Image (cartoon, rainbow, N blue to C red):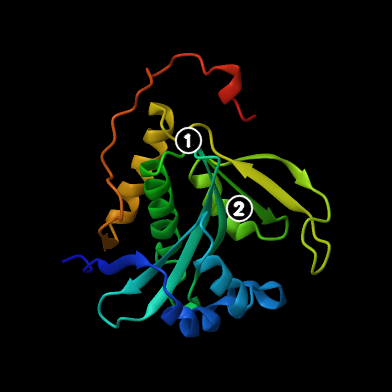
Amino acid sequence: MGKRPRQIELRQLEKSDLDEVMEIEPVAFGNHHWSRQSFENELTNRLGYYYAAIDSETKQLVGYSGYWLIAGDEAHITTLAVHPDYRRKRIGEVLLINNILTCREKGAKWLTLEVRVSNEKAQNLYFKFGFKNLGIRRHYYQDNSEDALMLWTENILRPEYLDILNERIEAVRRVVKVEWMAPEEFESPYIRGEEIPAGERRA
């Protein structure tokens, strides 16, 4: 008999979560982590949307993520972190999928982010979701002048991207029971295989 899937609840991140967030943040990002004040500022940022992953059994906050919705059609991921005891359990993928589904519902067509060139684990997560490296921002991180990779998706409304997303959702559902905060089902307004207009190409 197979192992019972872990059940994860998703909800908006709240100020009352910040004690738990600040236990995870320095472990996830070391000396480069956000301050508590940074999170408080982000929770009132009109462009920001932040979500928490909760273990349904223990009620522990096990991860969080969020993004800015820019100009209506771009979601810029600002943070994603998982409690060290819950790594390699698909929680990061759960949070990323929820970001994609919720920003899509809000009208986004693309996701973007910067990631440290040294953070290969995070890069590998994003590459599984169809992100592409569009270049390097030199000395992007002010704390240690580290370079950042600039990652983008193609249009997330296109059938080709939906194939990638649905494959990742199916893989996650084998080990995690979760209800997303936006609809999973989506009918693309685009025709599969049609040429991507020049204005939509990101690479």
Q: Residue at x 52, y 18 (%)?
A: 196
The number of numbered discs placed on residues in the rendered structure image is 2
Q: Position of residue 76 (x, y in %)?
A: 57, 49
Q: Label 1, secondary structure: give it.
A: loop
Vertical order, 180 against 52 (above or below): above
Q: Which residue is mark 1?
A: 109
Q: Position of residue 144 (x, y in %)?
A: 82, 67
Residue 190 placement, left or right of 73 = left
Q: Position of residue 79 (x, y in %)?
A: 56, 62
Give the residue type that dot 2 points to: Gln
Q: Label 2, secondary structure: give it.
A: helix
The residue carrying pointer 1 sits among few (fewer than 14), some (14 to 19) or many (20 or more) residues within 10 Å by Cα, namely: many
Q: Quadrant of residue 41?
A: bottom right
Q: CA distance from mark 1 to mark 2?
A: 21 Å
Give the residue type that dot 1 points to: Lys
Q: Tell me the quadrant of the picture where the C terminus can be found.
A: top right
Judging depth in this view, the residue of 144 and 43 nearest the camera is: 43
Q: Which residue is mark 2?
A: 123
Q: Position of residue 34 (x, y in %)?
A: 64, 73
